[in-house]
Amino acid sequence: ESGTAIRYVSGLRVTDDIALACVKEAAGTVRVEIEALLSLGLANTPMAGADIRVASGNFVTAQPLGVRDGIDLLHTGEVRKIDAAAIRRRLDQHDIVLLSPIGYSPTGEIFNLSLEDVATQAAVELAADKLIFLMDTEGVPDKGRAIHNALTVNEARQVLDKAKKLPEDVRYYLPCAITACTQGVKRAHLISRHRDGALLSELFTREGVGTLITPAPLETLRTATIDDVGGILGLIEPLEREGILVRRSRELLEMEVERFLVLESDGVIAGCAALYPFPEEKAAELACLAVSQEFRGRGFGDLLLGEAEKRGKKAGFKQLFVLTTRTEHWFEERGFVDSSPDHLPKSKQALYNYKRKSKVLQKTL
C-alpha cells in the first residue's frame, strides 16, 4: 500500500523505516482485534462469564540481525531475551499474555522479529508443555503425501534432510519445533489453520489431526508392573469375551505380571504380550499377545513379538511357541510353522485344552 518494494535476504525481510512503520501499525491492529475477541462475554454463548484479561508489553528484548550477505537488515532483529518471570506473574494471575513479533532493545530501538522466533524462544524460556504452530498445510507430509501423525526430533531432522518437496511453511516451522523440543519443550504441534476445530481435535483426540513432534518416541516397551494390571485387563477382556484369548483373572494376572511386556503409547497401555519359560526344553511360550483396537495397523504387534524374541534369545531359549485359534496366518507370516500338541513341553501338554483345539505354532530362535 505504501508503494515500497519488500526486500529479502536469505529469507529475512529487510525492515527499513517505512516497513517498520507498517509492521507497528499491523501489529497494533491485530493485537486490538485479538483483545476484542477475547473480551466477548455475551450471555448464552461459550464465552459467557469468561472475564478474560489480556496482557501485553515489552516482554521481548531484541537485538539487530545486522549485516547479512553484505546487506544491512536495518530494523530486522532477533530475540535476545524473554522476560519469563514477568510473563509467569501475569499467568499466575490468570491473564493471557499476548506477544507481538516486535522486540525492544535497551537503547530504546524497535525491531521487527519473526513470529516463529518469538514463539519458539518464549516456549523454551517458559518450559512450555506445548508449542503449537498453525499452518496453511495439514502437517508434515510423508513420501506418499499422507500426513505424519507423530515424529521424534531425530525423525523430523531426517524429514528435513531427505524430503525434496516439503511445503514452504513446513520447512519454516519444523526447524522451530525441533529447536523447541531439544531445549525443554515437551511437545510441538504443526496443524492446519484452515481446518475447523483443528486445535480441539489435535489436543483432545488420541490421533490428532496434524503432526506431533516429541523429543523421544511416544511408544515405550517395558516389563509390566503391578500398576499396569488394570490397563492390561482393559486390553484383553474384550478379546477374552470373543474367545480369542484364554480368560485370566485379576488375581492370576497380578501373580504373573512380571512375565508380561507392555507397549505404552502416550501413557496408555496399547499392547501386551507374556513370555512363559520352560527351561528344561529351552523353550518359551508367547501368550496373550494383544493390541488395542484403536492402535492396530501401526506395527505394535511386530514390536511386541520382536521384543519377546529378543528376550527369549537372551535367556538362552531355542524355541518359541504359541497357541492360537484366530491368528495362525499372522504368526506364519512372521516365521512360525505348524506344530502339534505332542511337540509342546511336557508340563504344557498336560494343560492343553483339547476342546478349545488351539493351533500350535513354533519358531526357532
Image: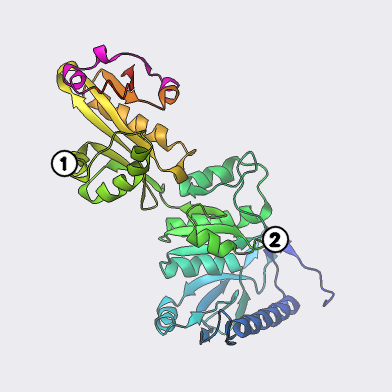
Q: Which residues are magenta?
A: 331-351
Residue 209 placement (x, y as % from top left): 57, 55
Alpha carbons under labels 2 and 1: distance apart: 66 Å
Circle 1 residue: 255
The answer to whether residue 65 is visible is no
Callouts 2 and 1 close, C-beta under 8 Å: no
Q: Quadrant of the N terminus?
A: bottom right
User: Disc 2 on helix, strand or loop?
Assistant: strand
Q: Would residue 348 be counted in the magenta stretch?
A: yes
For image coordinates 27% across by 30% down, the residue present is 311
Q: Is residue 285 above or below residue 50?
A: above
Q: Amino acid at mark 1?
A: Met
Q: Inspect the image, locate mark 2, and give the three-letter code of the amino acid beneath it.
A: Val
Q: Position of residue 178 (x, y in %)?
A: 50, 54
Q: Evaluate whether residue 147 shows in this view.
A: yes
Q: Counting other residues with Cα less than 10 Å from the Cα at mark 2, is it few (<14), some (14-19), or many (20 or more)? A: some
In magenta stretch: residue 207? no
Mark 1, other Cα within 10 Å: few <14 / some 14–19 / many ≥20: few
Quarter holding the C terminus is top left
**Residue visible at 22% across and 36% down?**
259
Is 290 situated left or right of 250 in this image?
Answer: right
Towards the viewer: 343 or 65: 343
From the top left corner, tell me how far across and down residue 291 is, in percent.
40, 39
